[in-house]
Amino acid sequence: MPERPWVGFLRGMNLGSRRLTNDELVHVVRGCGCEDVNAYQASGNVVFKDDRLEDEITAVLTTGLAASLGYPVPVFLRDAADVRDIAEATPFTQPQVAESRSKPQVILLARRLSAPALKEVMDLAPDGDVLVPATRELHWLPATGVGDSTLDFRRLDQLTGGTTVRTLNTVQRIASKYL
């Protein structure tokens, strides 16, 4: 079976005292058996090829990263088609984007949400923020800056099994450069 391209969006990389260079990240991911590994920006975006199933790759990366780095690293894995779909999405109108003081964001979810969980997640959106659900993502347009939003990420993580956030622009650049 030919190796498929994947993107791992890693949570909690290069925050606070946790520092890892792209070269170090590439080395760790290669050590997990992945091929043609590239890291994009120094924020936990890793592109690679692998012929294993998604659940297996996620488990191997989660275990390998924790063993190498000494702390847990949640992995949000998407294949090339998923990343291209996210990058090509246009969930917000031009007036919505113009009115926002922030950039469009992508909240990557650990799993697909049930209808009741999705309803509860959508109810978390603060006034002025726009949340648009996708397959295993939420497109998020904060009314204010990301750091100023009152979106309850603790509750969001409880409802979704975990999240990590990237700007839509970052996802688009990864798709155009590597996929």
Image (cartoon, helix red, strand yellow):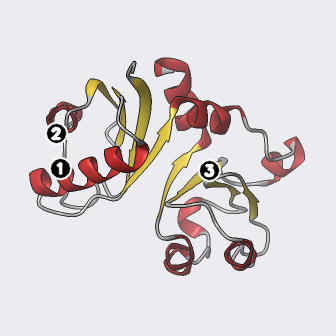
Image coordinates for residue 143, horizontal then vertical, percent: 73, 62
Mark 2 and mark 1 lie on one chain; the one further toward the N terminus is 2
- Tell me if mark 2 has few (under 14), some (14-19) or many (20+) residues whose alpha carbon lies within 10 angstroms of its own: some
Crowding around mark 3 (Cα neighbors within 10 Å: few <14, some 14 to 19, many 20+) is many
Disc on res. 64: 1
Verify CB contact (< 8 Å) between mark 3 and mark 1. Answer: no
Q: Horizontal and vertical percent for residue 72?
A: 23, 63
What's the residue at 24%, 34% (across, down)? 22
Q: Would you identify the image quadrant in which residue 117 lies? A: bottom right
Relative to 163, say whether 121 is above or below.
Answer: below
Q: Is residue 179 left or right of residue 150?
A: left
Residue type at the position of mark 3 = Gln
Secondary-structure class at tag 2: helix
Which of the image's four quarters has the N terminus?
A: top left
For mark 3, give the secondary structure.
Answer: strand
Q: Where is residue 54 in the image (x, y as percent from the top left)?
A: 42, 44
Residue 149 pos. (x, y %)? 61, 69
The CA distance from mark 3 to mark 2 is 27 Å
Q: Distance between the residues labelled 2 and 1?
A: 7 Å
The earlier-in-sequence mark between 3 and 2 is 2
Which residue in the structure is indicated by mark 2?
28
What label does residue 105 carry, if any?
3
Q: Which residue is drawn at 17% across and 63% down?
A: 71
Does the image show residue 14?
Answer: no
